[in-house]
Image (cartoon, rainbow, N blue to C red):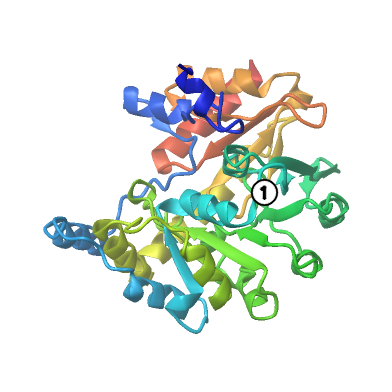
């Protein structure tokens, strides 16, 4: 009799379950301030809460295919209709579904690093090979390098993925570089999880009409502040979206998240409030810490800020540990480019942001 382990496909065998240790810590110790997971500190708007309450009373019914919310998303993005939109249980499921439709074991996904970890997770579970094209570190800044991405393309490349703005660096890639990559014809996923903080005029959604290989992914977890609702979507050519949608699990997005998402998308004033607050606080934090000698600040167009304190002689991991002693959970960043002073913060509320400034100044002045 064979052991059950012998029946697992080779590319799944041995892969551990993904556990977000910093989120587990935050739920386990609610007294700590959550400044680590790019969550929005402002709770859902009254209109969203009203939708949650209304459709919570209909949770005994299966959801429909989301034609109304998909139509709203298409309208916001200047697309023809709901056929250009695929919904997901967060953008994480959207990535999973896209990867499943294009990637076979042994084939390659190109990511631009440093970046969001979900691309690696979904590539590995399908037996794919992840190819990392690093950003350029120049003049104490991290810059996109479209030529490095193109140089990494082989006959095994099935997907290219770029976050815009990038997580964790917070910057945008030049529009002309998206065109260079789109012209390859390779499925090109542009992760726009944070684009609303800068405005949809920074979106690359306009590429879809000319390049059917381009897919735009978004989430309502960030600017809209619905991380716990798990609602994301993809935008693309009608035929491409239709084929990818065929691989979705039936009823993958629940009734409550779907209608809560519609309420959020229709509540333009609430989005404007969140974006205005976020962007003013980003500027405040960056200005307040600009006089910390040796601390490099990477200007962000999102709701997080990357720092590098290598030139202070102190490690980023030690800054994160110090902050936790002060009640703040920050996000460590692995050493890269021969430097070990990296760490990242998520914007909190006004009080939390001022606690953060005090903690950073205290740590680097010791």
- Image quadrant holding the C terminus, namely top right
| Front residue (pair 351, 203) | 203
Report which quarter residue 350 is drawn in.
top left
Q: Residue at 84% of width from left, 49% of height from top?
A: 152
For the question of whether residue 63 can be seen, the reply is yes
Q: Is residue 104 left or right of residue 250?
A: right
In the image: residue 47, left or right of residue 195: left
In percent of width and height, residue 47 lies at 24, 64
Mark 1 surroundings: few (<14), some (14-19) or many (≥20) residues within 10 A: some
Image vertical order of residue 216 relative to residue 134, above or below: below
Q: Residue furthest bottom?
A: 80
User: If the image is split into quadrants, where does the N terminus sit?
Assistant: top left
* Rendering quarter of residue 232: bottom left
Query: In the image, is residue 155 above or below residue 38?
Result: below
Q: How many marks?
A: 1
Residue 317: x, y in percent?
62, 21
The residue located at (28%, 59%) in the rendering is 45
Vertical position of residue 13 compared to residue 100: above or below: above
Q: Please, is residue 153 above or below residue 115 in the view? A: below
Q: Is disc 1 placed on a helix, strand or loop?
A: loop
Instruction: State the residue in front, 236 or 334.
Output: 236
Residue 236 visible in the snapshot: no
**Where is residue 55 drawn, in percent x and y?**
17, 61
Residue drawn at (61%, 33%) of the image = 11
Name the residue nearer the viewer: 210 or 3: 3
Q: For mark 1, what is the residue?
A: 299
Q: Position of residue 2 (x, y in %)?
A: 48, 18
Judging depth in this view, the residue of 320 and 215 nearest the camera is 215
Residue positioned most to the left? 57
């Amino acid at each position: 009799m064979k052991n059950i382990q012998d029946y697992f496909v080779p590319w799944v065998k041995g892969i551990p379950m993904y556990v977000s240790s910093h989120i587990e810590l935050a739920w386990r110790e609610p007294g700590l301030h959550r400044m680590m997971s790019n969550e929005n500190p402002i709770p859902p708007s009254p209109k969203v809460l009203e939708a949650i309450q209304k459709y919570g009373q209909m949770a005994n019914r299966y959801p429909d295919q989301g034609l109304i919310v998909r139509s709203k998303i298409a309208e916001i993005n200047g697309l023809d209709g709901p056929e250009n939109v695929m919904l997901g249980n967060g953008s994480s499921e959207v990535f999973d579904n896209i990867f499943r439709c294009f990637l076979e074991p042994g084939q390659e996904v190109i990511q631009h690093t440093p970046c969001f970890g979900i691309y690696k997770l979904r590539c590995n579970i399908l037996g794919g090979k992840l190819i990392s094209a690093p950003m350029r570190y120049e003049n104490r800044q991290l810059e996109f390098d479209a030529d490095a991405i193109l140089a990494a393309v082989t006959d095994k490349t099935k997907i290219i993925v770029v976050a815009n703005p990038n997580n964790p660096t917070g910057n945008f890639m030049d529009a002309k570089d998206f065109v260079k990559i789109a012209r390859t014809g390779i499925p090109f996923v542009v992760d726009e999880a944070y684009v609303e903080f800068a405005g949809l005029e920074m979106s690359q959604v306009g590429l879809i009409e000319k390049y059917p290989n381009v897919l735009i992914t978004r989430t309502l977890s960030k600017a809209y502040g619905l991380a716990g609702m798990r609602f994301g979507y993809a935008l693309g050519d009608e035929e491409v979206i239709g084929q990818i949608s065929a691989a979705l699990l039936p009823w993958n997005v629940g009734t409550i998240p779907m209608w809560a998402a519609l309420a959020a998308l229709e509540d333009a004033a609430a989005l404007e409030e969140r974006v205005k607050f976020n962007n003013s606080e980003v500027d405040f934090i960056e200005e307040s810490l600009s006089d910390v000698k040796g601390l490099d600040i990477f200007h962000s167009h999102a709701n997080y800020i990357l720092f590098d304190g290598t030139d202070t002689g102190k490690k980023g991991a030690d800054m994160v540990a110090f902050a936790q002693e002060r009640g703040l959970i920050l996000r460590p960043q692995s050493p890269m480019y021969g430097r070990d002073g990296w760490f990242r913060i998520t914007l909190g509320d006004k009080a939390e942001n001022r606690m953060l400034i005090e903690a950073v100044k205290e740590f680097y002045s010791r």
